[in-house]
Amino acid sequence: MSLTDSPDTDAQMTTKEPEAARLTIGESEYELPVRKGTLGPDVLDITRLYRNSGRFTYDPGYTSTASCSSKVTFIDGKAGKLLYRGYPIDQLAENGNYLETCYLLLYGELPDRKHFEEFEHRVTHHTMVHEQMNRFFTGFRRDAHPMSIMVGVVGALSAFYHDSTDIHDPVQRDVASVRMIAKMPTIAAMAHKYAIGQPFIYPRNDLDYAANFLHMCFAVPCAPYNVDPVLARAVDRIFILHADHEQNASTSTVRLAGSSGANPFACIAAGIACLWGPSHGGANEAALNMLEEIGTVDRIPEYIKRAKDKSDPFRLMGFGHRVYKNYDPRAKVMRETCHEVLDTLGVKEEPLLKVAMELERIALEDEYFIEKKLYPNIDFYSGITLRALGFPSELFTVLFAVARTVGWIAQWKEMIEDPEQRIGRPRQLYIGPKERDYLPMDQRTTEGWPAAASPPK
């Protein structure tokens, strides 16, 4: 079997043929069209490969497979670049705000003042949740993880908002989109308040998106709470930096759930469930847990030595990135934001944060980390920042879900409107038993059984 490129130019030809690759299997040859994006590598279109050849590709984790075409987000891992609708992430985070970014992701362009104010008004006036939803929270145990609450409550939104579940109606799709962006911070804050035994704080229409979220999380009815603008700006940047990240695990989950025609609230609940995994949205919580394990600055050399030892299973969390082979473009902005928060709160002397700052210094100077491009990533800095802001570690992934909601929705809407989209149905390489006949129970033997077929006594 071989795969070769077809020439796209020929000295004898006056017109240019579409570029294609040719796959040779035995004596048969198949042409695979080459599709080009505006940025990034070309892709081989294999949609007709199974139909024509009776074979399909094998790609665990889909790391070499484009599951869709998209105009939303672009990542160049080698160059350390992240674009939302063509705009560099650092420019958006440093100059814009989260709701402006939401508008961009949803509608494709940055809003002018008139459209932004209209959008901001719509979001602000949809932040309250149905009063009967308060009863949902009393059904959870007091020690329930906030992410489990988020999965349940967000999934239940479809039971309260029947007028925005028709995925074929563009108006209802838009209403559902705005509702989820607006209500997610309220639900997240309610999950936090429920966990710590404090009363729910209603949203306020006079506060911006990030300030309103901080107020709902930390205000109490018996005392005034004034939101520090530096801290609100930090949260707003965190939301921008986490708003979307191409076809990651949770986004792919949302698209896959949506491909079946499921309502948007169910799709976002599926994305939250996927995000909960420690290899995905839980990475910043894992990074903070690592810092707690190290404990003090004097123990750092011991853990650095372990991180360099290939035979030691210990790994430094919050360093390096699966996609970015250079510096994570979000980490630069997050680092600046982190230090702004620490300076504002005056908490740099806290032991855990001293460990984090020393680890950061070593990673940026040590040849081992530089050579392997193990730079501190966004999870490292966001975990420190959220800890300094007063959020418990179990709420970190919840904040990630709040920020990522707009990305999930933008990707979901794009999928619904894509004429090429079909229900997701990955194939498999079957390696189980061949066809065999059923035997009566008294004729069966355990000889050759796999260990999994013998339950423990």
Image: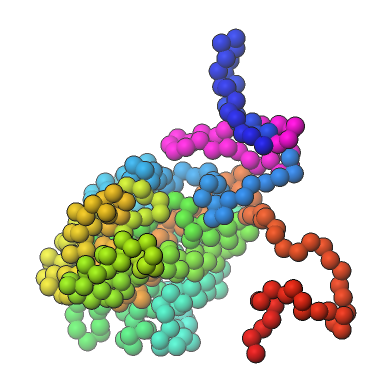
- Identify the residue shown where x is 20% and y is 59%: 362
Q: Give the range drawn in magenta.
A: 25-52
Say if 111 sits above or below 5 in the image: below
In this rendering, position of residue 447 left or right of residue 319: right
Residue 92: image location, x then y, percent: 29, 49
Which residue is at the far top? Answer: 12
* Residue 49 belongs to the span the image colors magenta: yes
Residue 347: image location, x then y, percent: 14, 72
Viewer-closest of 306 and 324: 306
- Identify the residue shown where x is 66% and y is 76%: 452
Say if 433 sits above or below 141 in the image: above
- Identify the residue shown where x is 23% and y is 52%: 367
> Which quarter of the rendering shows the C terminus?
bottom right
In this rendering, position of residue 238 left or right of residue 273: left
Instruction: Give the image's coloring scheme.
Output: rainbow
Viewer-closest of 370 and 256: 370
* Residue 6 belongs to the span the image colors magenta: no
Which residue is at the far bottom? Answer: 457
Q: Is residue 235 visible?
A: no
Q: In which quarter of the image is residue 6?
A: top right
> Which quarter of the rendering shows the N terminus?
top right
Residue 123: image location, x then y, percent: 37, 61
Q: Is residue 225 visible?
A: yes
Say if 80 sits above or below 342 in the image: above
Viewer-closest of 220 and 206: 220
Residue 169: image location, x then y, percent: 57, 55
- Identify the residue shown where x is 49% and y is 69%: 273
Total numbered badges shown on the rendered structure: 0
